[in-house]
Image (spheres, coloured by chain):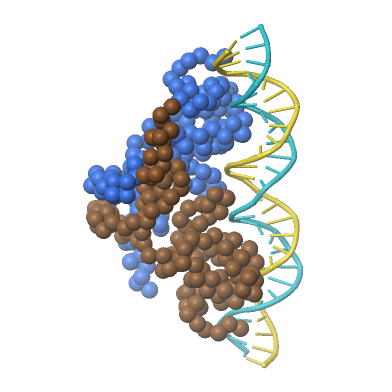
Chain colours: A blue, B brown, C yellow, D cyan
Amino acid sequence: MVKDNLFTSYLKKDGLKITNQRINILKCIKLFKNHFNAEDVYEYLKKNLKEVSRASIYRMLPLLKKDGIIKEVGRDENDKIIYECVENVPHHDHIVCIKCGKIIEFKNEKIEKLQNDICMQYKFKLLEHNMELKGICKECLKREKKNDIN
Amino acid sequence: MVKDNLFTSYLKKDGLKITNQRINILKCIKLFKNHFNAEDVYEYLKKNLKEVSRASIYRMLPLLKKDGIIKEVGRDENDKIIYECVENVPHHDHIVCIKCGKIIEFKNEKIEKLQNDICMQYKFKLLEHNMELKGICKECLKREKKNDIN
DNA sequence: TCCTTAATTGAGAATGAGTTTCAATTTCAA
DNA sequence: TTGAAATTGAAACTCATTCTCAATTAAGGA
C-alpha cells in the first residue's frame, strides 16, 4: 500500500499502478540536477536502501520519456542513453567544440519564435526541440593557427 | 595494389593505407542518397561481389565520421547508428511527429543566420548544426481529438 | 623488383546496454 | 476481502558493436 503524494498523480494519469518501485524511481530522477543514465538511477536507489531492479528502471525510463517527464539527450562514451529531467533542467541549446569538447549553453528567443512559426506552417503542435551547434572554440582556433606555422 | 582514383585522396590525407576494402566502403557510401547504417553497407557490398567484413566497416565508419565525410544522425528502431553521407544529402532540419514518426524536412535561412550570429558572439567557428523539432502532426492531432469524445 | 615492417584484415569470440521471460508478488476495483 | 490483471526481479537473452590475433597486404627503401 502506497500513500498518496505528489508522485502518484503522474502514474494515475497514465493508468499505471502505483508501486513503491515507481515512486522511488520518480523521486530519484527529480533529484538529478543534471544528466543521468539508467545505471545512475540504479546506483542511487541502491545506496539509499531503496533497491529496485534494473529491469524496472529500464521499463520505467521509456515511459517517463514518452510522457515528457524526462528527455533523451544523447549517448555517453559507453553508449548508455543519457537523460535529463525536464523540469530540473531549464530549456537551453548547446554549442559544442568538436576539438576540446567544451559545451556552451544558450537560449535565443528569436530562434524559438521562428521554430514556432515553422511548426504552424506545417500544422505541427510543437512540443520540444533539440538544437546543437558544432564548431571550434576560440582557444582551439588559436591553437590551430599556432600549429600551422610548420 | 590499388590504382589511384578519386577515393584515395581522402585516405592518403588521413595517413590511412589504401586498401580495396576502404575504397569499396567509400564508393558504397557515396551511393547512398539517404540514411544508411553499417549493415546497409555490408549488405550492399556483399550483393555487389565486393565482400568486406563487418569488422572493417565498423572500423571505417567512425573514421569517416571524424573526418566529416559522413554524419551520425541518430539511431533506428533496432538501435543501429544511422548515418548520412554529407555531400549526398543537402543540409536540412527535421520536424518529427512523436506519435506516428512522420518526418518533415525543412530549411530556414533566418534560423541559419541567427545560428551564425550566436556563434560569432561566442567566438565559435560554426561547422554544422543539428536541429530537430518534435511535436504532433495534423493527422495525429485530429485523431486525438476524435478519441477524446469518450 | 624484392624486402621489411607496420598497418590492415576477417573470423569468431567477447562485451555490454537494454529487453524479455515467467513465476511470484502486488495493486486496486468491486 | 477477493481475484483479475499489472508489476516485479532474477536470470536468460538479444544483438549492435568492439576486440583479439593470426594471416595478409600496402608501401617505401634497397
Q: Which residue is at 43% across, 50% downward?
A: B102
**Residue B75 vs residue A46, the one in the foreground:** B75
| Quadrant the N terminus of chain B occupies | bottom right
| Quadrant the C terminus of chain B occupies | top left
Q: Where is residue A93 in the image (x, y as percent from the top left)?
A: 34, 46
Residue A24 visible within the image: no
Q: Is residue D19 above or below residue A72?
A: below
Mark count: 0
Q: In this view, does D16 lie above or below C27?
A: below
**Residue A145 vs residue B139, the one in the foreground:** B139
Q: Which residue is at 47% across, 63% downward?
A: B34
Q: Which residue is at 40% across, 57% downward?
A: A98
Q: Position of residue B48 (x, y in %)?
A: 61, 73
Q: Toward which corner of the image does residue A22 lie, by quadrant?
A: top right
Q: Which residue is at 60% across, 70% downward?
A: B45
Q: Where is residue B122 in the image (x, y as percent from the top left)?
A: 27, 52
